[in-house]
């Protein structure tokens, strides 16, 4: 099985400050991989590197040829009073047709909101619309950066269930960042604990009981 993405011995720094070092990870097709780590530990930088938005100072990112990536960035700066419907919002950036937009909304579990105004959506619906937008180009790899920030725990759990359903239906790989390992655990095949470097990696059970993880997050 050919992996979707591999990083080899990655180093990234900003203004002389080292943010990532010796990062080697692999994402396989159909796999849901969750990155956890403290604030400022380089999680968003790693996702942006994999998406091609950040260049490494050292090392390589190897993507499967033709790989399509759907990306939901952290804290998207969108005007919350955006004067347009959900349908129109999806049509805008890629000029997809309406049927494609409706399929993506269905996959993201938010098709009943297709004709609502963006400004009327709940936090959970808004995140699903962003998910739908990332699904428009039928990605092989879906990247989500703290997509459940601001949602309550049931809302987050429902969102991650939807991510699993998307993976099951589309067969895409998923790479996501979450600060709520207890919520995201059941939806993750593999967890990578990052603190500038990969501290530990494995199944959610293995990582949540690993000394490296407990040192960073406490035992609670
Ligand atoms: P996380 O997502 O784990 O909270 P980030 O990857 O966003 O961490 O950031 C890691 C560190 O890199 C932080 O100290 C942040 O300020 C810094 N950083 C990230 N992107 C840039 C950038 N484009 N320019 C300068 N510093 C950056
Ligand atoms: Mg971040």
Image (cartoon, helix red, strand yellow):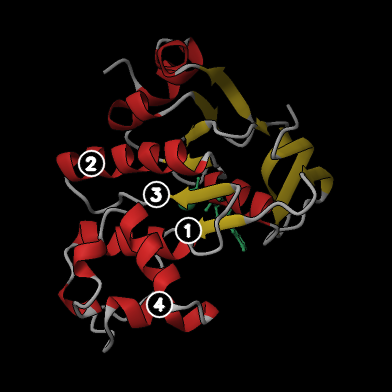
Instruction: Please say whether residue 217 is visible from this viewpoint.
Output: yes
Tell me which residue sits at (45%, 69%) in the image.
Answer: 100
Q: Are marks 1 and 3 in contact (CB under 8 Å)?
A: no
> Which of pointers 4 and 3 lies earlier in the amino acid sequence?
4
The CA span between labels 1 and 2 is 18 Å
Tell me which residue sits at (71%, 40%) in the image.
Answer: 5
Horizontal side of residue 150 vs 190, given as left or right: left
Which residue occupies the extreme bottom position in the image? 83
Label 2 C-beta lies within 8 Å of the nearest ligand 2 atom: no
Q: Are marks 4 and 3 in contact (CB under 8 Å)?
A: no
> Which of pointers 1 and 2 lies earlier in the amino acid sequence?
1
Judging by the rendered image, the residue that carries numbered circle 1 is 135
The CA span between labels 4 and 1 is 14 Å
Considering the numbered disc 4 on the image, is that residue within a helix, a strand or a loop?
A: helix
Tell me which residue sits at (20%, 80%) in the image.
Answer: 117
Asked if residue 188 is positioned above or below residue 90 in the image, the reply reads above
Horizontal side of residue 161 vs 137, given as left or right: left
Task: State which quarter of the image contains the C terminus.
Answer: top left
Considering the numbered disc 1 on the image, is that residue within a helix, a strand or a loop?
A: helix
Considering the numbered disc 2 on the image, is that residue within a helix, a strand or a loop?
A: helix
Label 3 C-beta lies within 8 Å of the nearest ligand 2 atom: yes
Judging by the rendered image, the residue that carries numbered circle 2 is 158
- Return the x and y of residue 190 as percentages of the image width and height: 51, 24
- Which is in the foreground here, disc 4 or disc 2? 4
Task: State which quarter of the image contains the N terminus.
Answer: top right
- Which is in the foreground here, disc 1 or disc 2? 1
Judging by the rendered image, the residue that carries numbered circle 3 is 146
> Which of pointers 4 and 2 lies earlier in the amino acid sequence?
4
Judging by the rendered image, the residue that carries numbered circle 4 is 98
């Amino acid at each position: 099985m050919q992996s979707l993405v591999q990083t080899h011995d990655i180093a990234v720094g900003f203004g002389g400050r080292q943010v990532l070092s010796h990062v080697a990870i692999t994402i396989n097709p159909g796999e849901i991989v969750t990155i956890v780590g403290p604030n400022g530990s380089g999680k968003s930088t790693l996702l942006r590197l994999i998406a091609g938005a950040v260049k490494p100072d050292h090392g390589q990112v190897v993507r499967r040829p033709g790989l399509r990536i759907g990306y939901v960035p952290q804290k998207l700066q969108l005007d919350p009073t955006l004067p347009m419907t959900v349908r129109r919002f999806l049509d805008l950036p890629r000029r997809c047709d309406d049927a494609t937009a409706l399929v993506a909304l269905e996959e993201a579990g938010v098709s009943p909101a297709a004709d609502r105004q963006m400004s009327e959506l709940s936090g959970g619906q808004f995140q699903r619309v962003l998910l739908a937008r990332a699904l428009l180009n039928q990605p092989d790899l879906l990247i989500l950066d703290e997509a459940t920030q601001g949602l309550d725990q049931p809302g987050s759990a429902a969102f991650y269930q939807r991510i699993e359903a998307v993976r099951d239906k589309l067969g895409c790989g998923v790479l996501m960042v979450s600060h709520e390992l207890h919520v995201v655990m059941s939806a993750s095949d593999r967890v990578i604990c990052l603190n500038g470097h990969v501290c530990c990696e494995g199944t959610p059970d293995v990582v949540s009981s690993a000394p490296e993880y407990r040192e960073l997050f406490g035992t609670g």
